[in-house]
Image (tube, rainbow, N blue to C red):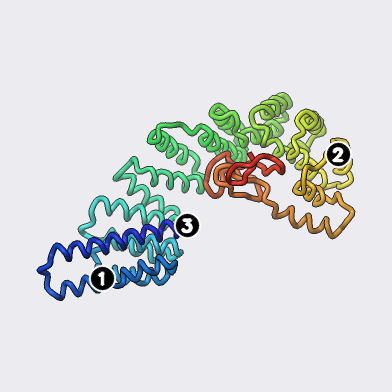
Amino acid sequence: MTATLLVLLVVGLLFVWVLFWRQWQHDDEDESTTIEHDERVSPLLRGINYLLTDEPDRALQEMVQVARLRSEAADVYMALGEMFRSHGEIGRAVRIHQNILARPDVSPELYLQAHFALAKDFQTGGLLDRSLRHYQKVLDVRSDHLDALMASLRIREQSSEWLKAEELLSRIERLQGNEDSLHRAYLWGALAQDAMQNDAYDVAQEYINNALDLAKNCGHAYILLVDLALKKDDEDKLHHTLSAMQHEAPDYLHLLIPLLMQSDVYTDELMIYWQEQHDHELALAWLEEVAKDDVSAAVALRKEMSFVPVGLRESLRLAAMGMNSDEFFVGQAKKWRMTMKHYGCTQCGVQTVDMRWQCPQCHQWGSMSAIIEGDKVNERGVSI
């Protein structure tokens, strides 16, 4: 049973208890009132039964009937709104929460809950500006509302509003009493990337420095710093960056291959690093980049490296480059390689084809890394 259904079940049970308790307290009620209670309890009990038998759609119909019979039951309406949202019926969820806010006697706590629910409705529906407005209404009343701050941060990041995201992160850190330096470093890295795209290289350099001052292992910052050094043709800066990256963020070195392949000087440096560390992900990325233009050159490079795959995953990647005599097998390996889950999140376990600096599921920054065959894995099945 989902969390939403569980909440609705608990609300329904509490509502039943309140109705019977009130009826017990008022034994002198007239028969018409008792019948009204029975009318409300009957669909509610049916709704609870449908929830227990995992029939949420039928349960929803019964709860709507309860809300109609007891229009003042805001708790039932709130639960219905959650139910509608979880079923993708965003418009109905919005109308329910707007109707609650339109009541003249809405309590401060209910006002807060309804605005927060409405913000979640709009966020789920992709109306991010409207969602932010309602989160802000929550924060205007309760500036320390952590859930509203976290949701607003996510929207700012989703909208690439990095400075506003950094401001929200500061507020969250003050509330939680800790600093998330890696998160902030990646926000500065995102700012640096935007500056690079606008050819504002000096600004980008400043942002990259800020990122690395906060977290020496910020992979995105190193990638941008290498790109910047290449654009400025600054060999000293490039060698220094590569050396630092080998010590501080070696897991991201393979992402540099397309950039470093622009010069034979840096491929020599890659060979030295391979001979020292035998980084299989780096080797495979290098071979794949070479094979794009010349499979025979990739075969020669593999021979020079004495590269031997450690398992099926690496063997398939080699086959996808054309390093196999069976054309059918090569064709199938190429199809597999195009959809291969290459990266995994060490926090939530989600896997993706392409590298993401922020996990698309748990939204953690710097948690994605290449899935390495043969490595130890954590409890979520992600290499560590």
Q: Amino acid at mark 3?
A: Gly
Kindly identify which numbered label has been placed on residue 126.
3
Q: Quadrant of residue 139?
A: top left
Query: How far apart are the alpha carbons under marks 2 and 1?
Result: 76 Å
Horizontal relation, residue 195 to residue 281: left or right: left
Q: Quadrant of residue 144?
A: top left
Report the residue marked by disc 2: 301
Report the residue marked by disc 1: 40
Horizontal relation, residue 119 to residue 101: left or right: right
Query: How far apart are the alpha carbons under marks 1 and 3?
Result: 36 Å
* First-in-chain label (2 vs 1): 1
Tags 1 and 3 touching, CB below 8 Å? no
Q: Position of residue 179 (x, y in %)?
A: 46, 31
Assign a secondary structure to mark 1: helix
Task: Kindly identify the residue that appears in the image at 67 percent across and 29 percent down.
Answer: 245
Indicate the quadrant containing the C terminus: top left, top right, bottom left or bottom right. Answer: top right
Query: How far apart are the alpha carbons under marks 3 and 2?
Result: 48 Å
Q: Amino acid at mark 2?
A: Leu
Check the image and name the residue furthest to the left: 28
Q: Is residue 294 visible?
A: yes
Assign a secondary structure to mark 2: helix
- The 10 Å Cα crowd at callout 2, few under 14, some 14 to 19, many 20 or more, is some
